[in-house]
Image (tube, rainbow, N blue to C red):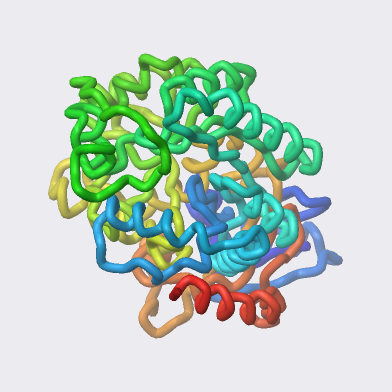
Amino acid sequence: MLLVARYVLPVSKPHIENGAVLVRDGRIEDIGYATKLKTRYPDEETIDFGLSAIMPGFIDTHTHLEYSAMRGLIEDVPYAAWKIHLEEKEKLFSLQDWNDSALLGALEALRSGITTIADITKTGASLRAIQEVGLRGVIYREVGTMDRKEVDEVFSAAIADVEHWREISDFESIRIGIAPAALYTCHPLIFQRAAEYAMDGTPLALHLAGSKEEYDFIRYGSSIFSVHSTEQERGYGIDMPPWLATGTSPVRYILNWGVFRAPNVLAIHCVQVDDEDIDKLVEYDVAIAVCSRCNAQLAMGIPPLTKFIKAGLRVGLGTDSPAATDATDPILDMRLGMLLQRAVNTRSDFITAAQMIRLATLGSAEALRLDDQIGSLEVGKKADIIAIDLSSSNQAPTHDPNSAIVHTANQDSVMMTMVGGKILYDREHEEIGNNRIFSRVEEMRIKLRK
C-alpha cells in the first residue's frame, strides 16, 4: 500500500514535500518523493490524502482510559479537591462500567491519531479496550496502600494481575508494567517492592511531583493529603498516624526507596521539581511524561519542559485522564504545552512546533523505550501512521506542516489512523463508532450524577 500526501513527516529527518510511504506486511518498506515511489511501485495500491501530512501516530505516554466516562463530572476545582471527589465517584462504578468507559476512551484515542497508549489501570479495563480496538500499549497495573499491614496482600495481587495480563497479551503490541500509585497513597514498601520487581526491565511508572499539595505533603508533612492536617478527610479509609515531614522534595524522597534503580522508569508530571531534582532524574535516566494540559486545567503548575529537553532527559507527552482534561486530543496538548513554555520562558529556550511533534511521537517512543520499533517513519519500523488534514480555510496557505499541525489542527483533523499497516480509522468511512458504548455512556452519566 502506497500512502501519498502533500507532506510526509518522518520526524527523524526533515519533512518531504509531495511524499509517499510504502507499507507492506505491517512495516514501512520505503519512503521518499511520491513521483519516484509511484514509478518504482507502479502496481501498488495507492491512497492519496491530498493536502495533508502523513506522520507517525501519536504516542500517549500517560492516560487513564477507564475514566473516560467521567469527563466533565468534576469541573473548575484544583487538583486535590478534584482527586478527592473523583475517588468518591469511583465507588459507583461496576467492572462493566470500567470496561465500557475504557472502550469509549480507546475509540476516542484512535480517532485522535493515537496509535500507542501508556495507561495506568486498577481494573485491567484499558488492556481489554486497546485489545478490542487494535491499539498498541504499555499497560501499568496500579498498586497502592498506605497501610503497612496490607502491603504484602496488595502487592501480591498486583503482581498476579501483571503475570496474567502478560499471558493474555501479544508482546509485539502490548507491554505490561507496574505503577505505584502516588507518594501520598503508597507505603514506602510499595515503592521498594515495585523497584525490586522491575529490575528485569519491567516498565515501571509513577505519578511524581505533580502538585503543590503533594510537594507540601512530602516536604512539610502538611497538606490536604495529610490525614490530620485539615478538616477535610483524605478518604483512603485507613487508620494511620499523621505523615511526618521529610524535609525534602518528592523526587529526592523517592530515591530512598530505590525506585530509580529499575532500568525502565517513567515519571509522570514532574511539575514541582528544581534543578537538583532534574539532575537526579538525569543521573538515573528516568523518562518523563509531561501532561501540560492536565496540569494547567487542575492548577498543578507548568512543568519545566524546556529544562527537561536541555538536560537530555527522555521526554514524551501525555494526555492524562479524560476525567481531568475532558478530551483526548494530543494536538491540543502539543499546542497548549508549547504556548505555556513560550509564555514562561519568553526568548530563552524557545520551543518550536517541530519539537512538540517530535515529543508527541519519537520522544514519547524513547520515553517508553519503544523507539527501535515506532515513533518515526523509517524503513523497517512498524507502520503506525496517521494522516492529518491541512486543507481547512484556517490552514491556507500552509508554509510549514509542523506549525500548521500544532497551531491550526485538532482532533477532527485526523483523516486516518493505521496501526501495524492496518487502517483502523478512516474519517471518510468512519466505522469505529459503537452504539452500545454510547448508550452505556448515558447510563453511566445518570449513575455518576447520584
Residue under the point 68% across and 55% down: 130
Looking at the rendering, which quadrant does residue 221 occupy?
A: top left
Instruction: Please state if 160 lies on the left or on the right of 348 as rendered.
Output: right
* Residue drawn 29% across the image and 26% down it: 278
Q: Nearer the viewer, residue 103 or 6?
A: 103
- The x and y percentages for residue 402 are 41, 59
| Residue 308 horizontal/vertical position (percent) | 31, 34
Rendered location of residue 380, percent (x, y): 72, 41
Instruction: Specify the farthest residue to the bottom.
Output: 393
Identity of the residue drawn at 71% across and 66% down = 424
Question: Is 60 left or right of 231, judged from the image as shown?
Answer: right
Q: How many marks?
A: 0
How far from the left and from the top, in percent, is residue 219? 20, 27
287 left or right, relative to 370: left
Relative depth, front residue between 63 and 447:
447
Considering depth in this image, is 112 or 246 the residue closer to the camera?
246
Quadrant of the image for the N terminus? bottom right
Q: Quadrant of residue 449?
A: bottom left
Left or right, 424 with respect to 353, comes to right
